[in-house]
Amino acid sequence: MQLHRSTIADHNESLLKDHQRRIQYLRSEVPRVDEVLPLLTDLQVAIPSWALGTGGTRFGRFSGGGEPRSLEEKIEDVGLLHALNQSSGSISLHIPWDVPQHHAAIRTLAAQHGLLFDAMNSNTFQDHPGQAYSYKFGSLHHVDKAVRKQAVEHNIEVIRQGVELGSKALSIWLSDGSNFPGQLNFRKAFQNTLESLQEIYAALPADWKLWLEYKAFEPNFYSGTVADWGQSLLFVNKLGPKAFTLVDLGHHLPNANIEQIVSLLLMEGRLGGFHFNDSKYGDDDLTTGSIRPYQLFLIFNELVEGMDARHMSHSRDMGWMIDASHNVKDPLEDLLQSVEAIKLAYAQALLVDRKALQEAQAQNDVARAQEILQASFRTDLRPLLAEARLQAGAALDPLQLFRQLHVRNSLIKERGNTAVATGL
Amino acid sequence: MQLHRSTIADHNESLLKDHQRRIQYLRSEVPRVDEVLPLLTDLQVAIPSWALGTGGTRFGRFSGGGEPRSLEEKIEDVGLLHALNQSSGSISLHIPWDVPQHHAAIRTLAAQHGLLFDAMNSNTFQDHPGQAYSYKFGSLHHVDKAVRKQAVEHNIEVIRQGVELGSKALSIWLSDGSNFPGQLNFRKAFQNTLESLQEIYAALPADWKLWLEYKAFEPNFYSGTVADWGQSLLFVNKLGPKAFTLVDLGHHLPNANIEQIVSLLLMEGRLGGFHFNDSKYGDDDLTTGSIRPYQLFLIFNELVEGMDARHMSHSRDMGWMIDASHNVKDPLEDLLQSVEAIKLAYAQALLVDRKALQEAQAQNDVARAQEILQASFRTDLRPLLAEARLQAGAALDPLQLFRQLHVRNSLIKERGNTAVATGL
Amino acid sequence: MQLHRSTIADHNESLLKDHQRRIQYLRSEVPRVDEVLPLLTDLQVAIPSWALGTGGTRFGRFSGGGEPRSLEEKIEDVGLLHALNQSSGSISLHIPWDVPQHHAAIRTLAAQHGLLFDAMNSNTFQDHPGQAYSYKFGSLHHVDKAVRKQAVEHNIEVIRQGVELGSKALSIWLSDGSNFPGQLNFRKAFQNTLESLQEIYAALPADWKLWLEYKAFEPNFYSGTVADWGQSLLFVNKLGPKAFTLVDLGHHLPNANIEQIVSLLLMEGRLGGFHFNDSKYGDDDLTTGSIRPYQLFLIFNELVEGMDARHMSHSRDMGWMIDASHNVKDPLEDLLQSVEAIKLAYAQALLVDRKALQEAQAQNDVARAQEILQASFRTDLRPLLAEARLQAGAALDPLQLFRQLHVRNSLIKERGNTAVATGL
Amino acid sequence: MQLHRSTIADHNESLLKDHQRRIQYLRSEVPRVDEVLPLLTDLQVAIPSWALGTGGTRFGRFSGGGEPRSLEEKIEDVGLLHALNQSSGSISLHIPWDVPQHHAAIRTLAAQHGLLFDAMNSNTFQDHPGQAYSYKFGSLHHVDKAVRKQAVEHNIEVIRQGVELGSKALSIWLSDGSNFPGQLNFRKAFQNTLESLQEIYAALPADWKLWLEYKAFEPNFYSGTVADWGQSLLFVNKLGPKAFTLVDLGHHLPNANIEQIVSLLLMEGRLGGFHFNDSKYGDDDLTTGSIRPYQLFLIFNELVEGMDARHMSHSRDMGWMIDASHNVKDPLEDLLQSVEAIKLAYAQALLVDRKALQEAQAQNDVARAQEILQASFRTDLRPLLAEARLQAGAALDPLQLFRQLHVRNSLIKERGNTAVATGL
């Protein structure tokens, strides 16, 4: 389903008067809003191919309808999101769920939708048809060299696929771990994993990055072989300058201070990117910003401060991705909400009065530091995001337009009610 | 696969001498061991039909082989466990995964294996073929009366199935909950659930019990409609004398003191039964006793003390069940390990010097109270369990015998490598 | 230190123009703001006497200066807060830290500051000079009847003190619990506590309420005798219609859904009041709204919905209190921030489009339900709180005025740098 | 209070017969027990000077009696423990709580009790009389260089004190952190801390080690500047070969896999030592082994495996210390229990069938790996510990003897009922 420019224009026209009143008021209250507009416009959040269909849990899955049946339809869905918000300008593929038949055709299709190919994701947490060895007991950390080799080769194949598509990063999430005390020798598991990662790293093109995700638990429930930021950092430091840690917000033990982790990884020059989502208990994979919006803002506060301190480009020098499971919402609506929440937190962070904050910190004026952060968080910046969209040719209210256009119904008509996105 | 008596006898013969030395030593150290032997023999732990095959997570499932393909084969597997340990004398069925074709035949088959039918489990956490309404947004708590009615009728049908089989309890686990703030009106969800439960309760035969499980989270990640023991207790108190709370060890928030919950539910006369498993993070469904064996002992310590205070029969007045997911072990081996861990904790609790403990408590002699509990926990009671098995005609070392007989290989030969137990 | 009306008037005059622009804009965006103004004005948050000085941890305490040296000075401090925000119109005393010499004089002093006496707090978590028995092993749950009796009598004495002052509620927080397995018989501890509470309840004047707080852990680290809402509810149900549960936001296990607990306690007619604070790990006693402002809003969302469903008066039918420890901030600044955060969350909850939310819930339109809640949360309602203050004769910006007046310096001059508030 | 050799001899004589029966049985069951005896004898657990008196929480402290009033009395108490168990052969001092008047005399006194001086502990988490700057907002991480300098100098002074006493390690626990978002710039806090640590490191004698503890939270409740093992490892790697991470079992987020952390720190050559205790919720500082004895065993399992892999001496190449708070038990009894639990876990780990475990791991035989570990944990090794004590001239049952001798009563008679150990 393709969106006509005129559809968006009509939508914007109908909301313009109200919008202009709001943005005008905001400009009067926060003079710097126009300064940050280009930054907001530039930030693009990659959509993972596996988040376009309904997700599930080990207890079941309740299909929505109209899910994409092919890589082409996934690209169309992301294209639609991008048309609506001009903020989702790339797609992150997952191999083997998204192996293209014809790479050139796929690249052309993506380009037609204004999309790039973000990080490529390998999969050694499941067994795939025709595979010689099982990953039941892990992949890159496996006690058996043959299994490790198979997993290494799969990752190298994913790089190859990515090269064809113009991707520049390999994102590795390992489910490797153990369910019971005694199952693993932790040290050997680490060393096997390191050796495997080194072989993959060696196959990385010069302009590529390797992002190593960590996760505290699930699907293994006793230990994870890359279980926290400290372990991921150990690995990437041993790998080399193209290796970085990737932070998924849901992959921590209860009460972890993620914003501090972000700050320290940036300090070490080893923060590669994000998988955004939200959670209350574990890796709940809920809509970003739906549970702890203030934490999301605090994370962006560290990102802006830390990237500026290293003179990094916010939009280009970090991988921004969503990783979520849409179990009870329309996946496309959920993604629109997530992207909005991410950019809202980014906008709030950009508008923090950083000079005042530094002064408050220098004086240990804790109450004032809190006031400064909360002032930015409390300011209603939704009109600013709308303005950024307006200027970029997107919809003033993407979710409203999505609903007015009955997009889901159209997709169901086109694709049927029982299609299941590959990988779900 | 049926076990010959002589197989067990041969096995026991080969281990007898060592066993006798150990039990003799234990008798000399702990004179009361023979007193508790009959209690140990009586305690039977029900095996859930869904735990006989390999379990999985939302990320995947790695099949073992030789999984039971039918209810009949599930009964055979439990029969085999029971022959090995004489401690797994019942099976807990799950509808619709285990709907019998011919109830009489199934009862006969179970009787041949010395098995009873423990609590029946309903399933409204998944959609089943041919179902009019979806449980995507819950079942007994659903905003739509028609959905609730369907779920109520399913539960009543489960009771009917259970009556045919000689079961005496309905075990209800509701996945009903919400993933996002605002999704539910908590009060209305509670009241709808209560109304639904009352309709089910009304259909309960006079000699049946209803067990209401609670669970903190998963598959919903914001709220659960029966989320903790307090909520379950509210429900069962409003339902009537045949309603009880069921405790699953993995269904709590981090750090919960489960043994205290057990004590208070017993005090209130509302503890109905257990789903045993172990966990480190959430509802990890690991082998009972594999992660926190001391906690398991402390729970049994409360059970023995509290049941004795109410003059309850340990074996008959409580539902003892396993609920686990066997992702990386042979399910039958895992179940043997779990039953052993449960009975070991029970034995340790039976041998606590209760009079001394009461004295220590009356004097706030905390160090001594700890010594008393740990003395029982530290005592090696494995020979006592072996003796109980020996006297009951079971194997001295069930796991060793299971392996020596190459049971899994036989099952694979018989059932194939790719069979998947129904419901998995 | 007393604030002149003219001081506030001058302050407001200086900020008035900006304020009027903001409130005018808000009125144009949210027409209902004027409807909720009276509710906002009415809500008064009690200040606990022990929060007026610098708090500490077991590792130490870093005094600020100018702390109140007497009950009179505590009342003056609350009077100052109330003059600044007209939202802190009562004080919650703690016995024996705040035993008045002359009740009439204290009542007059409070009245001069426009203050009432909120719930009285007893203290059986510490030993007090001259006390016959120690609370080392608990108080109301103690194995020794003589200790329980002493603790009961203390609570009755607290009621007596409260009657003299015009208070109408007794707030009981029990630290009773255990540090080690075996230390307590949980059932007997419950029953002893119940018996003790019944004796206290019997001494309650007809128009008084008893609020029973619960707490998961600390200062005991194995079990708490009133450890969660389920236990508190069991007690208050057994006590009678004047007994209610009190919720302290920091007293839960990790990840607890507090808003659901609030909803269910309201449903049961057993929610008596709140101790507001914020936390990341345990009972951190941080400034309300400083860590999880969205959770605070969700709690108020349940409060407004649930109280309205029971036709309760928001301001009169619930106990609103702060309970915090000000370790690194000026306590008075911290309290101003907390009250502001509480009223902001209340305002956000009042302005939720409840009709739309009900519709969304009735249709399981989860994405829309989230949009509705977040729209209210994202709206910048700080001008509305300022307007409520302006109309009530308080300061438009209490914290700014507090700083401009150099209140802390004045207090230090008056009281010295080393005064320590009683009880700290 | 000094223990006569004959007292111990008499005690042992009275228990000898029973003991010999038990150890003989154990030898018949576990032939390797005699091999590990020397290792058990060698392992000495340092007693921290601050754990000899009653501890408390922020809510209060309930004194026991007979607490040591001076460094000399602390040494006497550790001497007594060591006489009882021959396993507590060193004391870990805390400056400024334990500044000796005459170093030579103190060394002589310690030598008379057979005690060495283990790691020295600095204290910058409290303000001390006469100190120029406050640590309210931290010490080594402070925004003000003058405060950092003061804290650095204190640490250097602690080293000086230690040199006088023959200690060989400086143990640094920093409470530095923040209570509120915005309070700190995390990166600058890290860099300030690193600079401070480098200055301390430069003052370290050639044969000394620096141990850097980490702690997730408390007394700061938003961030910790050395909050997890990853952060500690970053620091010690930047410091140099004499810097190591110290693990306190209670300093982790909920559900952390501590044994894996131990394994990885050993792999990196950066594990310096332990603070043993146990906990259910946070840094509860309970008796070691009282809550999660199996976890303690698993930690020792990694220690034995990992130290052997690096050819380290168990007793000499690691710092073994207790860090606990004795709130409801006699501190000396608690310490006897803790040392016993530590050595029991060590013995269990030593007797793990490591060859069989490696085979099971190599075959992914998870059930067998569990059996191997649990077999060692389930074996009752208390007689082995008793035998090690017997051979070393200690008491067969230290706790029993402590009670029979009415040690506490003697100490109360000597020191009074209200003495408070310095630092408590």
Image: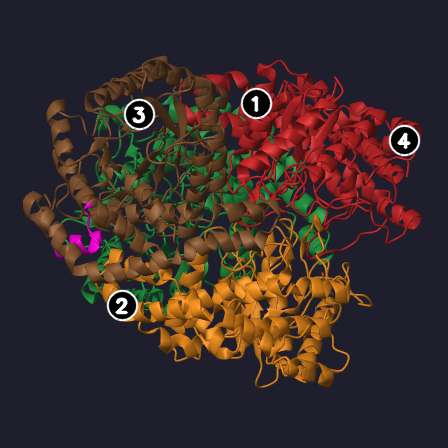
Chain colours: A orange, B red, C brown, D green
> In this view, which residue lies farthest toward the left?
C413
Residue position for label 1: B352
Q: Label 4, label 3: how many angstroms apart (C-alpha)?
A: 63 Å
Which amino acid does the dot numbered 3 rest on?
Ala
> Are callouts 1 and 2 both on one chain?
no
Q: Which residues are magenta?
A: C393-405
| Residue C169 image label | 3
Q: Label 4, label 1: how many angstroms apart (C-alpha)?
A: 41 Å
CB within 8 Å, label 4 to label 3: no
CB within 8 Å, label 2 to label 3: no
| Residue C403 part of the magenta segment | yes
Q: Label 2, label 4: how many angstroms apart (C-alpha)?
A: 75 Å
Chain under label 1?
B
| Residue C407 part of the magenta segment | no
Which amino acid does the dot numbered 4 rest on?
Ile
Which type of secondary structure does the marked residue at label 2 adopt?
A: helix
Q: Label 1, label 3: how many angstroms apart (C-alpha)?
A: 44 Å
Residue position for label 2: A358
Quarter of the picture holding the C terminus of chain D? top left
Image coordinates for residue D189, horizontal then vertical, percent: 32, 64
Circle 3 packing at 10 Å, graded few (<14), some (14-19), many (20+), is many
At 71% from the left and 52% from the top, the residue drawn is A62
Above or below: residue A86 compared with residue C242: below
Residue D60 vs residue D409, the one in the foreground: D60
Numbered disc in front, either 1 or 2: 2
